[in-house]
Image: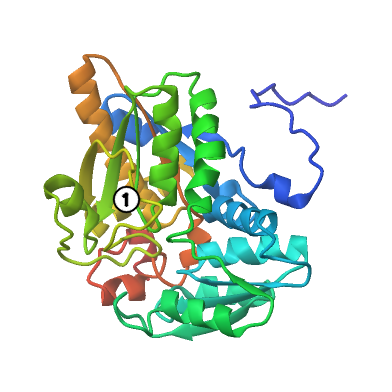
Amino acid sequence: MFALAPKRPYLSLMTTVQDTISLIGNTPLVRLAGPSEAAGCDIFGKCEFANPGASVKDRAALGIIRDAEARGELKPGGTVVEGTAGNTGIGIALVANARGYNTIIVMPDNQSKEKMDTLRALGAQLVTVPPTKFADPNHFVHTSRRMAEETEGAVWANQFDNVANRRAHIETTAPEIWEQMEHEVDGFTCAVGTGGTLAGVGLGLKAFSEDITIALTDPHGAALYEYYAHGELKSEGSSVAEGIGQGRITANLEDAPVDTQFRISDEEGLEWVRRLLKEEGLCLGLSSGINVAGAVRLGQELTAKLGRPARVATILCDTGFRYLSTLYNGEWLRSKGLPVPPWLED
């Protein structure tokens, strides 16, 4: 006879879905042991790397494409064009493939090789441009807009200023967190790229309870920390984090219910990336590490204010497998003046 394996708890039995894009969303929420211990409260991470495109941007991609279809702008055989640091492009390419559309992605040429290779593998037409300031007409966002205007049957996703982005988080991410935390949510925080996630989750959670504290977690080199702290768009320092860091108030960020703000260094974010990998078996990108660092600070502040252990959620944005040539490469880390973990020294 063989021995039965010991029983273990399961979240729930998976349900059958009608199509592959229905796999987007309904991601697990996990209590993070190390961050919870550091904060003296409960820190939860929304596992957005579990989406089909392995990032939180799948939600925005689906929301934007569905909105374009509903408005009659995107027709069968059409093309979706977008400027992106990579993850939104990957989400758009997957959703477009499932819906029968073509994809053109414009991307800064300093983003990870893994993202570029993934986009090409998905069949997207990839156009890379040098990184530059948003005011430059050759910025990747402006380049993508021009390409959309010049391509027959194309729509421009415009993730930064298309509020279908944040609406996707109001309608899906926020209620998922609320239900998964059994209606006991004290705070939420994440970094900003387009602003869709922070504003959408913030607005969605505030609709459940105005008492929930919404915090911006900003990397160095971005301007929003100073904006929410002192009313001025002003940046300091720099960051190697991809997909986050914003220098303007996008349409998605307008009226975002930001109650407080934190600024997190790459070193602090990377420390959490490494701890989550070695202690909890989660391989994540730097934006997730920065988010977790912000959640720890928010948890500490709320715990002191409430007089009890707070319950704080954040976003685990994407998989670390998308950064093997950068964050998980000792030579690259040394070239950026960042500490190299012992297991990558050789």
Secondary element at image label 1: helix
In which quadrant is the C terminus drawn? bottom left
Residue 319 percent across, percent down from the top left: 51, 55
As drawn, 246 above or below 333: above
Left or right, 260 with respect to 123, comes to left
Left or right, 124 with respect to 277, comes to right
Q: Would you call the spot at circle 1 few (<14 residues within 10 Å), some (14-19), or many (20 or more)?
A: many
As drawn, 229 above or below 155: above
> Is any part of residue 56 visible from this angle?
no
Q: Which residue is mark 1?
A: 290
Q: Nearer the viewer, residue 227 or 4?
A: 227
Residue 193 percent across, percent down from the top left: 38, 58
Left or right, 282 with respect to 119, comes to left
Quarter holding residue 304: top left
Q: Nearer the viewer, residue 279 or 215?
A: 215
Residue 65 percent across, percent down from the top left: 64, 58
Residue 235 percent across, percent down from the top left: 17, 63
Instruction: Name the residue located 46 percent from the left edge and 51 percent from the top edge.
Output: 317
Left or right, 30 with respect to 92, comes to left
In which quadrant is the N terminus drawn? top right
Q: Residue furthest right?
A: 1
Type of amino acid under label 1: Ile
